[in-house]
Image: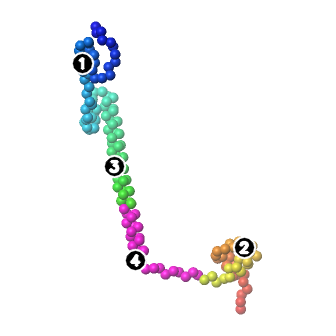
Amino acid sequence: MSTAPNLPTTDATVTAGADVRLKAVTHAPQQIAVGQLLAWGDKHPDADVQDQAARARIALHGLRQRHAADQELAAIDSEEEQLAKRLAELRERKAKLAPAKAKKPRKHVDYPAAEVRAWAKGQGIDCPATGRVPRAVVDAWRAAQPKAG
């Protein structure tokens, strides 16, 4: 029987008696490649370990697919930015080279807008107070005008 007090040990040595100290054996976990670890799990006699290996294989497959998709999306985004920049450059160059377009002359208004508005108001026809007089209002005003001749 040992006379050493039964104290918890906090370092790597264990007191085995008053005179003998034994070193605790500590092993750092061996780093194994994922493929080798999965193969080990598949061959393990414990069904739980085999299930873990199968789930890990499924998770890794999903991660690989997502990684590949993210890589492709990043490449697409980069190409899209380059194409947008190139398109802007081409449009700028096109604008410099293209001849100036002749401005279309505004159509001449061939009716007295104030008179047409006043007529529409007297007839109870809805007509905006500003802007162009609607074609239907102008047509109605023309039809109501006495024929010359």
**Callout 3 amino acid:** Ala
Towards the viewer: 125 or 117: 117
**Callout 4 amino acid:** Leu
From this view, report whether residue 68 is shown above or below residue 11.
Answer: below
* Residue at the image point whose x is 41% and y is 71% from the top: 92
**Callout 2 amino acid:** Ile
Of discs 2 and 4, which sits in the foreground? 4
| Between discs 3 and 2, the one toward the N terminus | 3
| Between discs 2 and 1, the one toward the N terminus | 1
* Residue at the image point whose x is 25% and y is 27% from the top: 27
Question: Which residue reaches farthest top?
Answer: 1
Residue at image mark 2: 125
Q: Secondary structure at mark 3?
A: helix
| Between discs 3 and 1, the one toward the N terminus | 1
Q: Are marks 2 and 1 in contact (CB under 8 Å)?
A: no
Residue at image mark 1: 22
